[in-house]
Image (tube, rainbow, N blue to C red):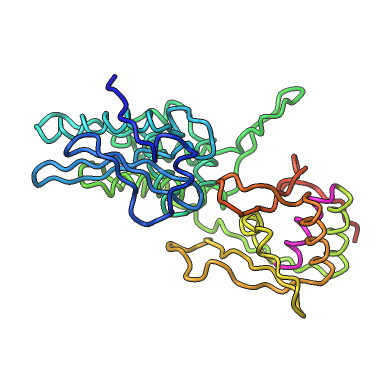
Amino acid sequence: MARTVRNAKLDTRSARANLPQQKAPHWMPITRSFSIGYRKGAKGGVWLAKLVIADFRQEKTIGPADDALDPNGVTVLSYAQAQEKAREWKARIESEQAGGPRSPITVREALDSYEADLKARGGDIENIGRLRAHLSDHLLDKAVADLTWTELRKWRDGLTKAPSGKRKTGPSKAEKLSPATINRTCTVFKAVLNHVAADPGHRINKQVWEHGLASIHNAEQARNVILDDPIVRQIVAEAYSHSPEFGLFVDVAAVTGARTSQIRRLTVADLQADGDVPRLMMAASFKGKTRTPKTSHHPVPITPDLANRLRAGRSCGKAANRAAAGEAGQRQVAWQGMAGCGPRSVLRVSR
């Protein structure tokens, strides 16, 4: 194992927290033609590697940095681990340049690469985690180039709900996913595989997953349910009876109509309650967008009652905590006490 080249600005998460967020990565040379880089993003940083040999130049995303989570050497990398993986990548590239065989990329590596790319672009990585829950170790360790139409179609048709991890008494039959959910899961899988196929160095037949993971026709069924105001107020009241934090979360959703991903990104500074009409500066939704929106936040008016509840939570400190990213002065709303209160929670509402 090669010696790790130290760098005071990159080798610890506390040092990287002081680096400015910028479009260009922070590069550190390992040798004259080989460098390791770090790109700081809003949701954490990623490691990169760069190799420049004569007329050849290539950059590679190595994986997510351990800015918030402890490193495990696979999905989260420390400075030393990133340097080691960068050296392995360099050795493969040099072998290929010398006419040696190119190592096939596995589905697991494709997932890691796509996740790192999403993080670098500030995208939503939650879908990657949901996809991983449906992939077996056999499929994860298989080379992308070795995937077959039959194998992918069998996987698609056999998709069932991922286990929750809770212990159950007695045997239970796996519940099949709805056609619409299957299509969404396959869309993420195809995006991962297309990310690999975009590399001209990989000779991969995209038709394998274009047909094997083809969408199920007539899967989407509109469920436009408009609730009367009394029903909405009853839902909010039931949520508050469950816990003050969960009630505040549902209250914000009911008043603003925002997505849960937008509400999770609210900070204390987003509450503007000093004017005639209180409002929240709501983060833009990335749903259906391939690029970052031009406006990161937009004002959403809220009721004075909700503004007072949010202000009370802010003043007593129960609804705010230090952002995990370590950004100075930023405090993110923490919807605490919400274990078991996800989208499948049941609120008893009588009509």
- 26 inside magenta stretch: no
In the rendered view of the protein, which quadrant contains the N terminus? top left
Q: Residue furthest top?
A: 1
Left or right for 321, reference 129: right
Q: Residue furthest front?
A: 8
Residue at image coords 48%, 67%: 293
Name the main secondary structure of what is drawn in magenta.
helix
Residue in front for this viewpoint, 289 or 171: 289
Up/down of 120 relative to 230, above or below: above
Taking depth in this image into account, of 195 and 44 the one nearest to the observer is 44
Residue 307: where, in percent of width, then height?
79, 67
Q: Quadrant of residue 313?
A: bottom right
- Tell me the quarter of the image containing the C terminus: bottom right
Q: Is residue 253 magenta?
A: yes
**Position in image of residue 326 (x %, y %):** 56, 46
The segment highlighted magenta reads 243-256
The percent position of residue 74, horizontal first and vertical second, equals 43, 30
Determine the residue positioned at 72% across, 51% down.
320
Observer-nearest of 222 and 345: 345
